[in-house]
Amino acid sequence: SQTIHQWPATLVQPVGSPLSLECTVEGTSNPNLYWYRQAAGRGLQLLFYSVGIGQISSEVPQNLSASRPQDRQFILSSKKLLLSDSGFYLCAWSAKSGSPNQVQYFGPGTRLTVL
Amino acid sequence: GNSVTQMEGPVTLSEEAFLTINCTYTATGYPSLFWYVQYPGEGLQLLLKATKADDKGSNKGFEATYRKETTSFHLEKGSVQVSDSAVYFCALMWAGTSGSRLTFGEGTQLTVNP
C-alpha cells in the first residue's frame, strides 16, 4: 500500500532563517506531488505541484520554492522565512492513470511557526 | 473560475443529532467532488467522493449527493458521534493543462458533545 511521510512534524524558526520541509511517498512510482499551505482557521492553498522529476509548477508567487530531486521526494524550501509563512504545510500525492479526476492523498503535515 | 463555498462554522451538535454541512460550487465543465476530513493535528483524509451528476458518495455513515442542477454537494450524517469532531472540507477537482487540481472550501469545524 502507499504511504506518504512528512518531516519534521513541527518546526519553530526565527524570521529570516532558511527552511527545508521534506515529503516522501512509498509504494507508488511517478506520482503527481503537491504542496499546500493551511493558514490558521482557513482553507488550503495550493503552493506547488509536480508531475515529474525536476518539473515544478508554482501556483502562488512568494518566497517559497519547491524541488523534486527524486521521483518520490518533494522538498519545500525558503531562503528567508517571513512571519506570514507560519502555517500547516501539507504534502499530497496522486496517481497518473489518464483520468483527470484522480484522488489526492495527504500526508500528516508539518506545523511551522515563524517567530 | 472554479470555487467552493462551504457553510460557515463552527457547528456544535449533541451526540446522535443529524448533521448537514452545505457545500456549493462554481465550475466550468463537470468536476469531481470530494469531502475530506481533518482530525485535530492531522493531515486530510478522503471521506467520500462523487465523479458525476446524481452520484452519491458514502463512507462511515456520511453521505453526499452530486447535484448538478443546484451545483451542490451537501454532507449529511444521520447520527453524529463525538469521534466525528473534526474539520470538514469540500473540494472540487478539475483538469488543468498539466494535470488535475483540487480547489477547497474554507472548511467547517464540527464539534460533537456527549
Image (tube, coloured by chain):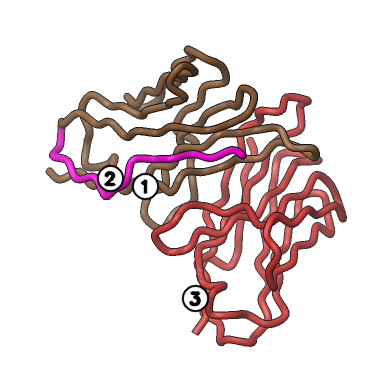
Chain colours: A red, B brown
Q: Position of residue A103 (x, y in %)?
A: 61, 33
* Direction from residue B79 to residue A92 in the image, left or right: right
Q: Is residue B55 above or below residue A15?
A: above
Q: Which secondary structure, mark 2?
A: strand
Q: Quadrant of the N terminus of chain A?
A: top right
B13 relative to A80, above or below:
above
Residue A71 at x, y = what percent? 82, 49
**The magenta segment:** B1-16
Q: Amino acid at mark 1?
A: Val
Q: State which chain disc 3 sits on.
A: A
User: Hey, what amino acid is under mark 2?
Assistant: Leu
In percent of width and height, residue A81 lies at: 62, 80
Residue at coordinates 36% horizontally, 29% vertically from top-left? B75
Look at the image and say whether residue B8 sits in the magenta stretch.
yes
Question: In the image, which disc is placed on residue B87?
Answer: 1
Residue for badge 2 = B110
Distance (Cα) linking label 3 and label 2? 25 Å
Q: Earlier in the sequence, mark 1 or mark 2?
A: 1
Position of residue B25 in the picture relative to residue B11 (left or right): right
Q: Is residue B83 magenta?
A: no
Q: Neighbour class for label 2 at 10 Å: few (<14), some, many (≥20)?
A: some
Instruction: Bin the neighbour count of mark 3 within 10 Å (Cα to Cα): few under 14, some 14-19, many 20 and up.
Output: some
Q: How many marks?
A: 3
Identify the residue at image location x=23%, y=24%: B78
User: Do the residues at pointers 3 and 2 share their chain?
Assistant: no
Q: Which mark is residue A113?
A: 3
Q: Cα distance, mark 1 to mark 2?
A: 6 Å
